[in-house]
Structure formats: C-alpha cells, structure tokens
C-alpha cells in the first residue's frame, strides 16, 4: 500500500499541535486501559520567609506515579530536603493507590541518592550528554 501523506516539522502553533497529539494518545490509552485518574502534584521546600528552596513534580495515573523532576537549590543540598520531598511524594502516591514509583536521573545528578531511598535501576543509556549516562529507576510501593 502506497501512502501519499507527508511528514511535517511543525513551526507554528506547536502548543496547539502538541495538545492535539496528546489528546489523541490519551483517548487511545483510555480506550485500551481505562480511566487515568491523572493528578499532577507540585511539592515545594521553603525557608522561614517562604522563599522556594526546591521542589518536586509528581505525576500519578493508573496505579503508578512518576517523579517528573526533583530540584534543590545548591545551598540546601545534603540538608535532608530531598529525602523529605521524596518521602512526601511516596506518601501521596500510596494514598492514591500507586503500586510503583519511577523516575530517571543523569549520572551527574543523583543516582546514589535514589538508590539509598530504595529505588532499583532497571535501565540506562550512555553518551547523552557526552561522557555521561541516564539511569531509569523504579520502586515498588507497599500499601501502609
């Protein structure tokens, strides 16, 4: 079968086109696997004056939760904020019924940190960025 369509690199209205593509994928996923029960949670760590020291973005859907990002200001790293953010994210994930939590990190970021929190590496890639690697982690969540 010959296809007469073409591939286009969108240059205008990329936001609207991205939403159209996501909507198509989400409709298909719902049809195949049921409702997402999607929630996005943003947690922040703040100082006594309310200034943001860092935070975490957690996406939850079906029976899993994904740590989209964890960031801390360099001045507060290694002071326990990362552990506190991750523990709160796990608590929220469990409360939503998630059975697992997953994330990815680069070799120059925090693989050891996540391993200390009980995450298990299940894959990776080398060479992007040059001389570094990307690591994929998962943690089974027990319901408490």
Image (spheres, helix red, strand yellow):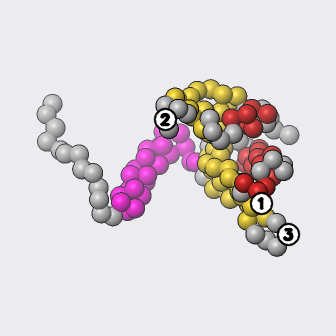
* Residue denoted by label 1: 45
Q: Image check: 141 left or right of 127? A: right
The answer to whether residue 40 is seen in the rendering is yes
Residue at screen point 43% across, 54% down: 23
Q: From the viewer's side, name the closer residue of 65 and 82.
A: 82
Mark identifier at residue 48: 3
Which of disc 3 and disc 2 is earlier in sequence?
A: 3
Residue at screen point 73% across, 65% down: 52
Q: Quadrant of the C terminus?
A: top right
Whole-Å distance between the Cαs marked 2 and 3?
40 Å
Whole-Å distance between the Cαs marked 3 and 1?
10 Å
* Residue denoted by label 2: 130
Q: From the viewer's side, name the closer residue of 115 and 77.
A: 77
**Crowd band around label 1 with a 10 angstrom C-alpha radius: few (<14), some (14–19), many (20+):** some
Q: Image check: 45 left or right of 106? A: right
The answer to whether residue 95 is seen in the rendering is no
Mark identifier at residue 91: none
The local secondary structure at tag 3 comes to: loop
Whole-Å distance between the Cαs marked 2 and 1?
32 Å
Magenta-tinted stretch: 14-36
Q: Are marks 2 and 1 in contact (CB under 8 Å)?
A: no
Query: Is 130 located above or below residue 6 in the figure?
Result: above
The local secondary structure at tag 2 comes to: loop
**Crowd band around label 2 with a 10 angstrom C-alpha radius: few (<14), some (14–19), many (20+):** few
């Amino acid at each position: 079968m010959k296809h007469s369509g073409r591939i286009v690199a969108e240059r205008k209205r990329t936001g609207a086109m991205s939403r159209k593509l996501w909507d198509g994928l989400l409709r298909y996923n719902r049809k195949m696997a049921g409702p997402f029960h999607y929630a996005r949670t943003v947690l922040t760590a703040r100082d006594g004056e309310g200034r943001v020291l860092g935070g975490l973005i957690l996406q939850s859907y079906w029976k899993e939760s994904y740590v989209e990002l964890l960031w801390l200001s360099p001045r507060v790293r290694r002071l326990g904020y990362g552990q506190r953010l991750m523990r709160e994210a796990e608590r929220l994930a469990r409360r939503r019924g998630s059975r697992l939590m997953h994330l990815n990190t680069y070799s120059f970021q925090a693989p050891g940190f996540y391993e200390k929190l009980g995450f298990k590496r299940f894959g990776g890639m080398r060479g992007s960025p040059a001389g570094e690697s990307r690591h994929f982690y998962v943690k089974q969540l027990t319901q408490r």
